[in-house]
Image (cartoon, grey):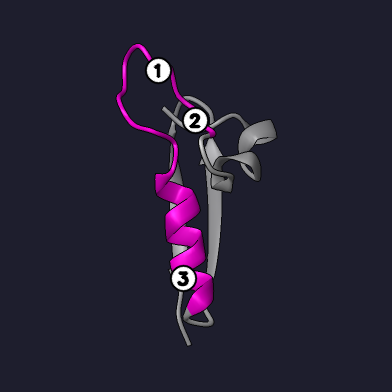
Amino acid sequence: MGIPEAMIEQVFAPTVRAVDRSRFSGTGFGLAIVKLLVEAQGGAIALTSRQGKGATLRLAFP
């Protein structure tokens, strides 16, 4: 599936959804919450994506 490259930074904002709302449920808060929790622990989060192939979310903790 993947996430459009132009949306990669935006998906970490609350209520932003990169996928079709009619096909997938959710509020758009998931990645925003994950980012806050990871960064609160001194970690980092990175997202890479290939449209039509998939996305990879990497979490790094100290």
Per the image, the residue denoted by label 2 is 17
Name the amino acid type tagged 3: Val
Q: Which residues are magenta?
A: 16-40
Is disc 3 in contact with disc 1, using a CB cutoff of under 8 Å?
Answer: no
Q: Residue at x 51, y 29 (%)?
A: 18
Secondary element at image label 2: loop
Name the amino acid type tagged 2: Arg
Is residue 5 found inside the magenta-colored segment of the image?
Answer: no
- Where is residue 40 shown, x and y percent of the image? 51, 76
53 displayed left or right of 11: left
Per the image, the residue denoted by label 1 is 21
- Where is residue 44 shown, x and y percent of the image? 55, 71
* Distance CA(mark 3)–CA(mark 1): 26 Å
- The residue lying toward the viewer, choosing from 61 and 22, is 22
Per the image, the residue denoted by label 3 is 38
Is residue 36 found inside the magenta-colored segment of the image?
Answer: yes
* Distance CA(mark 2)–CA(mark 3): 20 Å
- Seen as rendered, the residue at the extreme top is 22
- Where is residue 43 shown, x and y percent of the image? 51, 77
Mark nearer the N terminus (3 vs 1): 1
Secondary element at image label 3: helix
* Local crowd size for mark 1, using a 10 Å CA cut-off: few (<14), some (14–19), many (≥20): few
* Distance CA(mark 1)–CA(mark 2): 8 Å
Name the amino acid type tagged 1: Arg
Is disc 1 in contact with disc 2, using a CB cutoff of under 8 Å?
Answer: yes
Secondary element at image label 1: loop
Q: Residue at x 69, y 32 (%)?
A: 6
* Local crowd size for mark 2, using a 10 Å CA cut-off: few (<14), some (14–19), many (≥20): many
